[in-house]
Amino acid sequence: MIWVIGGTSDANKIVEKLLISDRKILVSTTTTYGSQLAQKKGVTVIQKQLNKDEMQHLIMDYAISKIIDASHPFAQVVSENAIEVCQNNNIPYVRFERKVKHYPDALYYQSYEEMVSALKQSKGDILLTIGSKNVGLFSDINDRIVARVLPVQESILLCENAGLKAHQILAMKGRVTTDTNIALIKEYGIQHLVTKDSGEAGGMEEKMDAAKACNIKVHILGRPKVNYPKIIQDIEAFG
């Protein structure tokens, strides 16, 4: 059985490619939303944040012959654990990595702490498009924050726990168009857009185009450094 570490649109596309070849697939996700998207005929879905020991048990229980890691570019611990258990069990590991594009007009950071420190020195309201997990790291500038997150209960609760009020939470599904980004920037008087380097699938082009059209600053968290043993950047290669 092939294990696809999922929870992303990339993972779902890879699974569709693999199913054409009538392969047995297991998909792991960490969220209810990701689990719902992964549901397909012939696919076993597990929804859980797996630690290293649990990954090891999964390999044994399901006789995993290969791991395809299509987790989010910022799921560093997941990827590092998957690489280690593959090495320990002598099974192939393949990383699907979204292509990286550098935006010369953007400001780049290697940590949220560095980013928050810079934003503290700025003026104007901030649109966070980083998901809900790390919204709490921006608590020192909460009064300037508007967060765009998935329209699911766990995301809303994380924002509320971080101290955001209802008018500061934009619950919207995933990737949005340039025009929608522009409309949100104008509606909320945004001067700074915060995002992660999540690639084309993460809506980077639409965000950058909207920021340029509105003449606002873009702040990008750079991807973590992971020593992947094998990388594939073309989903078609999994067919």
Image: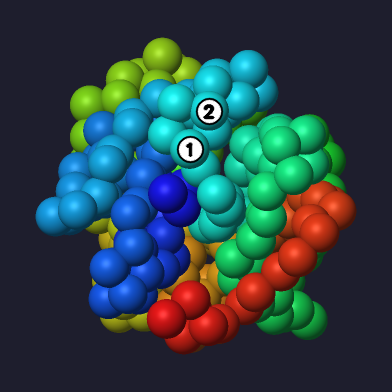
CB under 8 Å between discs 2 and 1: yes
Residue found at x 47% / y 58% = 190
Could you tell me which secondary element the residue under label 1 belongs to? loop
Q: Is residue 17 visible?
A: yes
Could you tell me which secondary element the residue under label 2 belongs to? helix
Label 2 CA crowd tier, 10 Å (few <14, some 14–19, many 20+) = few
Estimate the x, y position of residue 71 in percent, counting from the top left. Answer: 53, 50
Label 1 CA crowd tier, 10 Å (few <14, some 14–19, many 20+) = few
List the residue tagged with mark 1: 63
Q: Is residue 118 visible?
A: no
| Nearest the eye: 158 or 93 | 93
Q: Is residue 10 left or right of residue 156?
A: right
Estimate the x, y position of residue 182 in percent, counting from the top left. Answer: 36, 74
Residue found at x 65% / y 23% = 52
Q: Amino acid at mark 1?
A: Ala
Residue found at x 81% / y 51% = 226
237 to 83, vertically: above or below: below
158 to 24, vertically: above or below: above
| Nearest the eye: 56 or 77 | 56
Q: Is residue 225 left or right of residue 159?
A: right
Estimate the x, y position of residue 44 in percent, counting from the top left. Answer: 27, 42
List the residue tagged with mark 2: 60
Estimate the x, y position of residue 111 in percent, counting from the top left. Answer: 79, 41
- Asked which quadrant contains residue 87, the reply is top right
Q: Amino acid at mark 2?
A: Met
